[in-house]
Amino acid sequence: MFYWFLRYIALGPVLRVVFRPRVMGGEHVPEDGPAILASNHVSYADWLFMPLTISRKVTFVAKAEYFNSPGVKGWLQKKFFSGAGQVPIDRSGANAAEGALRTAKRVLASGELFGIYPEGTRSHDGRLYRGKTGVARLALETGVPVIPVAVVGTDVVAPPGKKFGQFTRPHVRYGRPLDFSRYEGMENDRYILRSITDEIMYEIMRLSGQEYVDAYAAVAKETARAERASKREAAEAAEAARDAGGTGQDGTDGSEMTPLPGGRTEPDARAS
């Protein structure tokens, strides 16, 4: 009930009027029955705009911290995410992937739409990264079609790492459903899982127009963070070296001063 309140009364109308999201290929989403919506992930606002462009509810998994925060703020946050179609998952444990898979199966078994980001995390630079094979396993174990989705422009509306962005019209593009029934019973074959995942990512790339990087987003994000930290430390070290070598303890440039008539001073050439 709260989901539809947010969608049609509280939040949805505001987002539609302010941002006017565009949709292409919405006819590829079935009017009923289960389906997996596999999308790129460039902004934390992706899950807000995708459901606005179709008439059905879309369920996503979200990290459990959004549902476990204490106090009134935590309660409101839990109500919001629950009402917006999010279900909690503990991503810190060793069985996080299995927990997400069980949740997805339960949603699909009830005939609903399940949204998933195969990259596993947001892209930090707008490029499309290698997909994890959980989406392929889910498709094979449930026999449900996968609909590739590309969300474009949300990284302008809500840029990663920034509180505010720019006004633009996000674009949500849906591809034709992908049927992987030819691989039935092969959900434990890692080569098949990789092949299916790569096919899904190719369709997402084709829809989004993003540059593809054959590396996991989480690894690329950590590498970029480490490089930034290294550059920052190098800059700080260089600045400290300049400060240490360019001035004396008395704050001068390190040379001795020779008194001149009138109280003026000049550097003593003998000190050089």
Image (spheres, grey):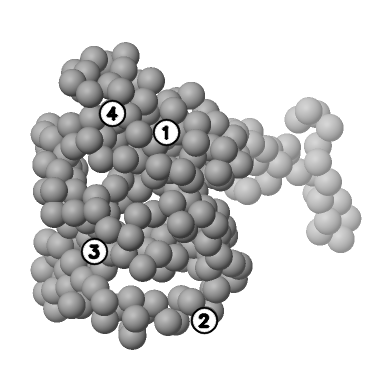
Upstream in the sequence, badge 2 or badge 4? 2
Residue ID for mark 1:
200
Q: What residue type is labelled 3?
A: Gly
Upstream in the sequence, badge 3 or badge 2? 2
In the picture, the quarter occupied by the C terminus is top right
Q: Where is residue 252 in the image (x, y as percent from the top left)?
A: 68, 46
Q: Which amino acid does label 2 sit on?
A: Val
The mark tally for this picture is: 4
Q: What residue type is labelled 4?
A: Ser
Bin the neighbour count of mark 1 within 10 Å (Cα to Cα): few under 14, some 14-19, many 20 and up.
many
Tell me, for residue 17, which label it has, or none. Answer: 2
Give whichever of 74, 26 is nearer the camera. 26
Residue ID for mark 4:
181
Q: Where is residue 214 in the image (x, y as percent from the top left)?
A: 48, 24
What residue lies at 47% left-to-right and 58% top-to-bottom?
26
Q: Is residue 183 above or below residue 47?
A: above
Q: Nearer the viewer, mark 4 or mark 1?
A: 4
Q: Nearer the viewer, mark 1 or mark 3?
A: 1
Residue ID for mark 3:
85
Bin the neighbour count of mark 4 within 10 Å (Cα to Cα): few under 14, some 14-19, many 20 and up.
some
* SS type, badge 4: helix
Give whichever of 191, 132 is nearer the camera. 191
Residue 131 visible in the snapshot:
yes
Are the residues flagged by discs 4 and 1 in contact, CB closer than 8 Å? no
Are the residues flagged by discs 1 and 3 in contact, CB closer than 8 Å? no
Displayed quadrant of residue 196: top left
What residue lies at 29% left-to-right and 48% top-to-bottom?
35
Bin the neighbour count of mark 3 within 10 Å (Cα to Cα): few under 14, some 14-19, many 20 and up.
many
* SS type, badge 1: helix
Q: Where is residue 96 in the image (x, y as percent from the top left)?
A: 15, 38
**Measured Cα–Cα span from mark 1 to mark 3:** 24 Å
